[in-house]
């Protein structure tokens, strides 16, 4: 177990690609995948992609950017994964934060959540399907 502490943040490595971040009395789990030049970070239902880690391995979020979106209404796979459960059907009304699809990658579950209130226009994946990074999973209107 590795541990890095700063003035107000403590990061503890729980397993390869899994970290606990303690900040202002809160504990949050963060998942990390990819190379230092193309790092994928999954935190609080959001996916970030970018360069993380300079020579000291701790370059910050100034180089990170939100994962690329296919369109304003398309939810995409953040990394190669297996679809383990589809929780919505076309025509279903969804609220911001609702889990629409559950993925599994690197022995962790990745919920794909609605970024805003809307309606499911189409489901572009199937249970058990292997999807690549940036594959469209659900279209919202």
Image (cartoon, rainbow, N blue to C red):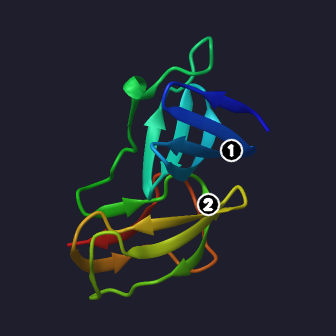
Figure quadrant of residue 139: bottom left
Residue 120 image point, x, y percent:
29, 79
Please tell me which residue is depicted at 45% across the width and 66% down the height of the picture: 112
Q: Residue at x 49, y 48 (%)?
A: 25
Circle 1 residue = 17
Q: Is residue 36 left or right of residue 14?
A: left
The quadrant of the picture occupied by the N terminus is top right
Comparing 137 with 7, the one in front is: 7
Q: Can you tell which of label 1 and label 2 is closer to the viewer?
A: 1
Residue that extends furthest to the right in the rendered view of this protein: 1
Among the two numbered marks 1 and 2 on one chain, the one whose residue lies closer to the N terminus: 1
Residue 139 is left or right of residue 67, and the answer is: left
Looking at the picture, how far across and down is residue 33, in whole percent?
Answer: 62, 42
Residue placed at 71% from the left, 40% from the top? Answer: 13
Q: Is residue 114 left or right of residue 13?
A: left
From the image, which quarter does the C terminus lie in?
A: bottom left
Which of 123 and 21 lies nearest the eye of the viewer?
21
46 in relation to 115, above or below: above
Q: Position of residue 47 (x, y in %)?
A: 45, 49
Secondary structure of the residue carrying tag 1 is loop
Residue 53's image quarter?
top right
For label 2, the SS is: strand
Query: At 46% from the left edge and 58% from the top edge, which residue is drawn?
Result: 135
Number of residues whose C-alpha sits closer than 10 Å to that of mark 1, classed few (under 14), some (14–19) or many (20 or more): some
Choose between 20 and 108: the one closer to the eye.
Answer: 20
Q: Which residue is mark 2?
A: 81
Exactly how many numbered labels are in the figure? Answer: 2
Query: How far apart are the two marked residues, 1 and 2, measured between alpha carbons?
Result: 15 Å
């Amino acid at each position: 177990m590795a541990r890095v502490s700063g003035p107000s943040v403590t990061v503890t490595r729980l397993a390869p690609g899994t970290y606990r971040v303690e900040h202002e009395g809160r504990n949050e789990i963060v998942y990390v995948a990819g190379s230092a030049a193309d790092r994928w970070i999954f935190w609080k239902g959001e996916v970030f992609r970018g360069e993380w880690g300079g020579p000291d391995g701790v370059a910050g979020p100034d180089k990170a950017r939100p994962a690329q979106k296919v369109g304003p209404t398309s939810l995409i796979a953040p990394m190669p994964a297996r679809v383990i459960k589809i929780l919505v059907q076309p025509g279903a009304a969804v609220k911001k934060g609702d889990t629409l699809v559950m993925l599994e990658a690197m022995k962790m579950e990745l919920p794909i959540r609605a970024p805003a209130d809307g309606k499911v226009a189409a489901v572009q994946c199937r249970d058990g399907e292997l999807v690549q990074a940036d594959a469209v999973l659900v279209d919202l209107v």
